[in-house]
Amino acid sequence: MRKLLVSVLMLAALLASPGFAEGLLPDIPKAMGEPHPEGNEWWRVNHPALLMHSRDQTVIEGIRDVDASIKTCVACHAVEGPDAAPVTYESPKHICRACHDYVAVKIDCFQCHNSRPEEADWAAVLPSLGGTPESLRAYLERISQ
Amino acid sequence: MIIPTTEKGAEISRRDLLKKGGAMATVTLAPGVTLMAFGGQASADGLKKGARWGLLIDAGKCPEDCSACVTACSNEHGWKNNGLDTDPQWIRKVTLREKATGRENSLPVMCQHCDEPPCVDVCPTGASMKRADGIVLVNRHICIGCRYCMMACPFKARSFVAEEVTDQRTTTPRGNGTVEACNMCVHKIDRGDGTTACVEACQATGNNAMIFGDLNDPESDIAKAVSTYASMELRADLGLGLGVRYQNV
């Protein structure tokens, strides 16, 4: 029993140490927008079903203001690359790849969808180009119409 | 599959919170377990009920050397022509010549948005579909790229994406291995622009050869025009009930 306790404590210490986290766990980039009210854990579990449902709403029923739109995901979670542009799905730093590489789940969304906002909107979603939560909100508002 | 957050008002979308500032009450049940109730309702607009979107094209006003509509479509939807047989064909200028008289006529041809679309009949997966407002489009999420619809279309309106596509317009996702065609700028219609890219471009040139509108709305320009002046469908013998009509062909 004591052995078990010691090993659990050691494991906890290992997980808590920064070196371990950086090396083995996915490095999930921070988003600029406001946090999800349902919490990140909830979104990690439910985003595939939400995206699936919302895509049918948009394509079949013409509803653009949906709960989970891939356009808003990649805008809010845009990651700046070395060229002052949001990275595409080609980069391992892309929000989707950060986790999907880790869990080895291949997604084909970006064979058709753009994995970042269009160039004209980069300034709205990247803080280094002058993007603020307000400009992001205005952009999200526009694309959900 | 259980789909969470489908009932509007019961749960809140992320966008509602952004929009409405999130009038919410949080109840903590136990450490780490919270109940959240949100004010406001998500708007479930969607397509216009009872509409039948259509185009009226006056070939008499369409000069042979003008291709503004084709260029506008290319810019709006992000497709490019490389001069290859496999190029996308959302809209193209076609020149007709009457053999007996030699009279030539130039007109744009795109998806005719049939009432009874043959492409929908033949699609094995249900990807080729007609929206409730009459717009015929490809649901690329379930398109397997078999190209039956391309064979079935009497207007040669559909084409196949034969190359990988990057940096798509965010309003028009398109990628390798799927079939595509004119979608009557469905994103603009849903946005409430009340026009399409080709019609906007045609009006900008001053030719005014194209009108877009709701054929079922008697007050719309297009409904008034088709009820007043002669217009025809291409291949009317097929009885497909087209959403795109032509004058002076």
Image (spheres, coloured by chain):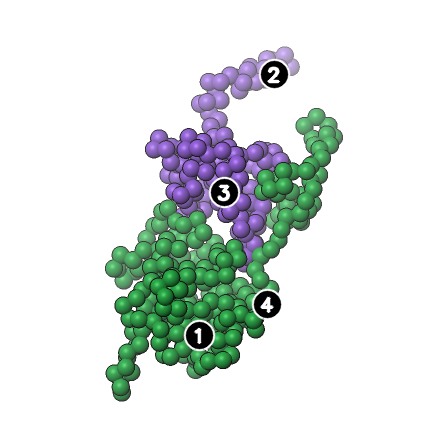
Chain in purple (letter)? A
Local crowd size for mark 3, using a 10 Å CA cut-off: few (<14), some (14–19), many (≥20):
some
Q: Helix, strand or loop at disc 3?
A: helix
Q: Which residue appears farthest toward the front when viewing the image?
A: B206
Q: Chain of mark 1?
A: B
N-term-proximal mark, 2 vs 3: 2
N-term-proximal mark, 4 vs 1: 4
Q: Pinpoint residue B104: horizontal percent, then vertical percent.
A: 28, 78
**Quadrant in the rendering for residue B61:** bottom left
**Quadrant in the rendering for residue A106:** top left
Q: Helix, strand or loop at disc 1?
A: strand
Q: CA distance from mark 2 to mark 3?
A: 52 Å
Q: Residue at x 27, y 68 (%)?
A: B65
**Colour that chain B carries in the picture:** green
Asked if both marks, 4 and 1, belong to the same chain, the answer given is yes
Q: Is residue B105 above or below residue A55?
A: below
Three-letter code for the amino acid on which mark 4 is drawn = Gly
Q: Residue at x 62, y 35 (%)?
A: A37
Q: Which residue is mark 4?
A: B50
Asked if both marks, 1 and 3, belong to the same chain, the answer given is no
Q: Is residue B49 above or below residue A124?
A: below
Q: CA distance from mark 4 to mark 2?
A: 68 Å
Q: Nearer the viewer, residue B224 or B40?
A: B224
Q: Chain of mark 2?
A: A
Q: Are marks 2 and 3 in contact (CB under 8 Å)?
A: no
Q: Helix, strand or loop at disc 4?
A: loop
Q: Nearer the viewer, mark 4 or mark 3?
A: 3
Q: Pinpoint residue B209: horizontal percent, then vertical percent.
A: 39, 70
Q: Pinpoint residue A99: horizontal percent, then vertical percent.
A: 48, 34
Q: Which residue is mark 1?
A: B245
Asked if both marks, 4 and 2, belong to the same chain, the answer given is no
Q: Helix, strand or loop at disc 2?
A: helix
